[in-house]
Amino acid sequence: MILVAVCRPHKPPQLPNGYLSKPVNYISPKLVILHMNLALHVYDDIMRMTENLSEKYIIGYGASSAVYKCVLKNCRPVAIKKLYSHPQSLKEFETELETVGSIKHRNLVGLQGYSLSPSANLLFYDYMENGSLWDLLHGLPKKKMLEWDARLRIALGAAQGLSYLHHDCSPRIIHRDVKSSNILLDKDFEAHLTDFGIAKSLCVSKTHTSTYVMGTIGYIDPEYARTSRLNEKSDVYSFGVVLLELLTGRKAVDNESNLHQLILSKTTTDEVMETVDPDVSSTCKDLGQVKKVFQLALLCTKKQPTDRPAMHEVARVLTFLVCENASLDLPASPTKQRESGLTLPSSPSYVDKYANLKTPHVLTCTASLSTSDAELFLKFGEVISQNSLG
């Protein structure tokens, strides 16, 4: 018997242009887990839950990234930051991993894991239920009225996060892109700093580092822009602009109008209080506090970096203001005060403290106010008295 095999020529499927130049990935990318929240998950699980990172799961965008929401097997949400595939994004991925992966603070967004793949690198972060401060202040339509007490606490949380980076980390970390869109708010509206893609480390022996100017227009320290010399005071300047946003509800830059320049012009005509956000005016029990935060913001944005306070000083002043604001809500009865769980300091008002500090020997303060705190308030009091808002 003779078998005859008839063969027909094989026509391979048409491949898209450039297909063969792309790397072939036969193994699913690995998900590196840094937090128990991601336990029992693999990369393929994440892709399935987000339908391969479908656009419908996007909750925000950055200059070089998109952010997705993913609900895990334990029903808890996580934020996934997908960095676009270009050299700068790779550098930002490495910087974020090196920075956030090695530090932890309640006012910094926590890194839960990461994944590397030829198509995109992913960073898995704590999910923040109330989005960014920018969304709350400037988003349309406004999600929620932000009361004065909430704004003070948001300012304090962001200040404490920056203070940790500047004073408690070794080497020190300069965020370099402090702005309202990089301050995220959890379910309790507590502030968490995010986006460390262009952060810089500064060793103890150095007062500054020379680097390319990076950041966001409206928040960039003019001296850093002029000299390319970066240190912690550049973050302080940016934080001062965020304080102005919280006070006025205005954007840092809007239709070529610069918020900081606007406020400076208003100080010369004693019209600063006219710029206050109506949501602040209607919920603040003591507008003297608003003036003090304006003054603090102007200190943070002084032209010369050496004239600006350090972030740990800013955080202590805001802590005092938050405590004072809380005291305004407490009932007058000592019994009811004890029942509320808060203890009022038996000290003069914030304004009185500034007056007393011109003669420090008559200072009366709470037991928790140390000598260095007293010196701090004296320093701020002197500068503020020279730059009064009336």
Image (cartoon, helix red, strand yellow):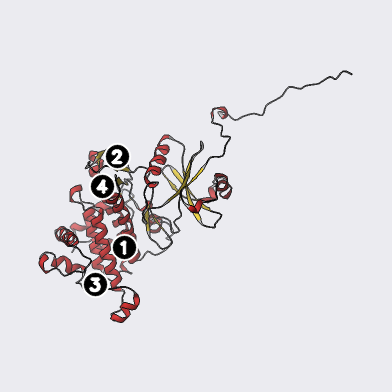
As helix, strand or loop, the secondary structure at mark 4 comes to helix
Q: On screen, 189 above or below 343?
A: above
Q: Earlier along the polypeptide chain: callout 1 or callout 3?
A: 1
Mark 4 to mark 3 CA distance (whole Å): 32 Å
Contact flag, marks 3 and 2 (Cβ < 8 Å): no
The residue carrying mark 4 is 232
**Residue at the location (44% across, 44% down)?**
65
Name the residue at the right extreme: 1
Residue type, label 1: Leu
Residue type, label 3: Pro
As helix, strand or loop, the secondary structure at mark 3 comes to loop
Seen in the image, is 30 located left or right of residue 215?
A: right
As helix, strand or loop, the secondary structure at mark 1 comes to helix
Residue type, label 2: Val
Q: On screen, 218 above or below 106?
A: above
Give the mark count: 4
Q: On screen, 381 above or below 209?
A: below
Seen in the image, is 121 located left or right of residue 99?
A: right
- x and y, in percent, of residue 122 in the image: 48, 43
Mark 1 to mark 4 CA distance (whole Å): 22 Å
- Is residue 299 among the parts visible in the rendering? yes
- x and y, in percent, of residue 310 in the image: 23, 52
The residue carrying mark 1 is 152
The residue carrying mark 2 is 213
Q: Residues within 10 Å of mark 1 (few under 14, many from 20)?
A: many
**Residue at the location (87% across, 18% down)?**
2
Mark 1 to mark 3 CA distance (whole Å): 19 Å
Q: Earlier along the polypeptide chain: callout 1 or callout 4?
A: 1
